[in-house]
Image (cartoon, coloured by chain):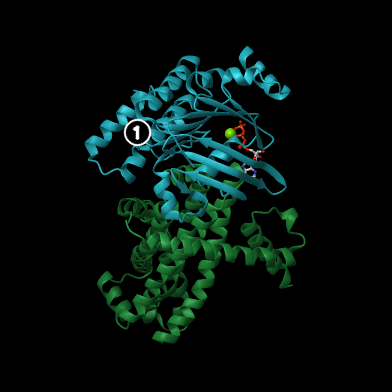
Chain colours: A green, B cyan
Amino acid sequence: MIHVPLFVLAATVSGAMTGGRLRDQVPVARNFLVAVFEWFGDLGLFCGRLIRAALAPPYEFGELLRQCDAIGSKSLPLVALAGAATGVVLSLQTRYSLIRFGAKAFLPAVIVFSIIKESGPIITGLIVSGRVGAGIGAELGSMKVTEQIDAMEASAVDPFKFLVSTRVIACILMLPLLTVASNFCGICMGWVANTLAEPISLRLFIEDGFKSMNFSDFLPPTLKTAVFGLIIGIVSCFQGMRTTGGTEGVGRSANSSVVLSSLFVILADVVLVRLILTVWG
Amino acid sequence: MKENGLESAIKIGDLRKAFGEQRVLNGINLQVRQGETVAILGRSGGGKSVLLKLIIGLQSPDAGSIRVAGQEITKLEENELNEVRKKIGFLFQQAALYDSLTVEENVAFPLSRHAKVSTDERSKRVHELLADVGMDRDLQKMPAEISGGMQKRVGLARALALNPEILLFDEPTAGLDPITAAEIGELIVDLKRKRRMSAIVVTHDVHGARTYSDRMVLLHEGNIVAEGTFDELQSSQDEFVAQFFGYGSRS
Ligand SMILES: Nc1ncnc2c1ncn2[C@@H]1O[C@H](COP(=O)(O)OP(=O)(O)OP(=O)(O)O)[C@@H](O)[C@H]1O
Ligand SMILES: [Mg+2]
């Protein structure tokens, strides 16, 4: 039975990578492999060009700032809301479990730890994949199909420098900050939900929660979201810049940017969590 | 290569380009001298836009040489190519304005990137450029909020922003009313006379081209089938050429 979800996943991913329709995906196995290799090959070339463009002066600070605003500030409400909801749900769920095991005193610590170590970062990563991934995929995609990217090249401006590198760097910089915001909202709402069930002062909650936490519990999980940012930025810019086929193609790019960037964020999370546990115990 | 002591602005030799099975250009030879305006005519889908994009390096040819402003652009690195591109003003067939920028910002874009001028000077230059193409209002509108003909004129102003030596215009007068089209024609003549700009203008407007071009070139099935002044081409012995210009002159 496990083959069915695998097949669906393969079909979705190869569809996203090749821009093909379901009908073209029946001989999945072979086409899928070819598509995946091609996709990664192209991605490698794309990254090479991106690195060269990003490192060569002059730097596009103005545009970078604009992108930080578009990607960071404009995602803040959504990310804060998602973080807050996570806090509430965590508080409600763990409360009953802990009471059942007679470990209610650990509630603040459990909430703070699980938000900071995992739920905050991954929820932020996935929310931003959705919002920013689709945005970048569609924006660059429509610029591509309406020849605006060509127009930029014709004006001797490297779109990899002006459009791609600024977006990727903005994603890398903004994700950790958004994660901190999401963690903050999550912990606050966790306290609110907790207090509604059984009053506890915010100070005590925070003190209890952070008592056994140190910097190495906070820093690695928060900074790992910079990697999520890198993934979201590169994947969605890549999908946007290789858009073909008019309006329909723009839709496909937006769609595949979200599918692929959230998929890779989750996969990267697995690797990074393992890595962080190995390095920082 | 050199003629009258001047190197030609554009010199294309045996240029070939195919998309998959479809051969679009089959060995084009074309030369544009300094200060000369060449009009390219041809059937729709004949590869005129592709030719212009090859000249500015947006696409790469399958074979052949393209010399622009003394440089073989097919062999250049990205940053060397960009130096050549700064000398070229390119107008896209669909204008290709940046749709997240206003009309004014669109024209200012190349200036803010490449010209070291103060903000005041830049805005003055932008207004001049837009006035030259007859756009003296709606400067704060977005491209989606102006008509197709207006977009074309803004695209033209943007192409002229950096004072290029070479102009590549893809249908500058298509979609414009006859009066504006004539004004654009005059603008091209003006640019040639005052600044000795060299130009390739792709157009379907045979009569307009007659007023501003020094030479006309007819592109058909991937080859240049005729070359000369309007009168020469109209009295051509070749059936297709005569038909093309005969029809054009009647309309
Ligand atoms: N990126 C591309 N991929 C595949 N085929 C292309 C591409 N660009 C152009 N073509 C093909 O090349 C041919 C020439 O196109 P081009 O746009 O140069 O025509 P044109 O002479 O400019 O026509 P028009 O006068 O209608 O603008 C067309 O048949 C087109 O299908
Ligand atoms: Mg064309």
Identify the residue at the far right of this view: A27
- Identify residue for label 1: B104
Residue for point 39% across, 60% down: A54
- Outermost residue on the front side: it is B4
B40 vs A91: above or below: above
Q: In front: A123, or A153?
A: A153
| Residue drawn at (55%, 44%) of the image | B54
Q: Whole-percent x and y of residue B243?
A: 70, 20
Q: Position of residue B143 (x, y in %)?
A: 44, 33
The image shows residue A181 at horizontal and vertical percentages of: 34, 63
On the image, which quarter does residue A24 sit in? Answer: bottom right
Instruction: Indicate the quadrant containing the C terminus of chain B: top left, top right, bottom left or bottom right.
Output: top right
Residue at the limit of the structure toward the top, as seen here: B250
Q: Is residue B223 above or below residue A275?
A: above
Q: Residues within 10 Å of mark 1 (few under 14, many from 20)?
A: many
Give the tally of numbered discs: 1
Q: Amino acid at mark 1?
A: Glu
Residue A86 sits in quarter: bottom left
Q: Nearer the viewer, residue A43 or A89?
A: A43
The residue marked by circle 1 belongs to what chain?
B
Q: Nearer the viewer, residue A43 or B36?
A: B36
| Residue at the spot 53% in from the left edge and 66% down from the top edge | A44
Q: Is residue B204 visible?
A: yes
Q: Is A248 placed left or right of A143 in the picture?
A: right
The percent position of residue A139, horizontal first and vertical second, equals 48, 47
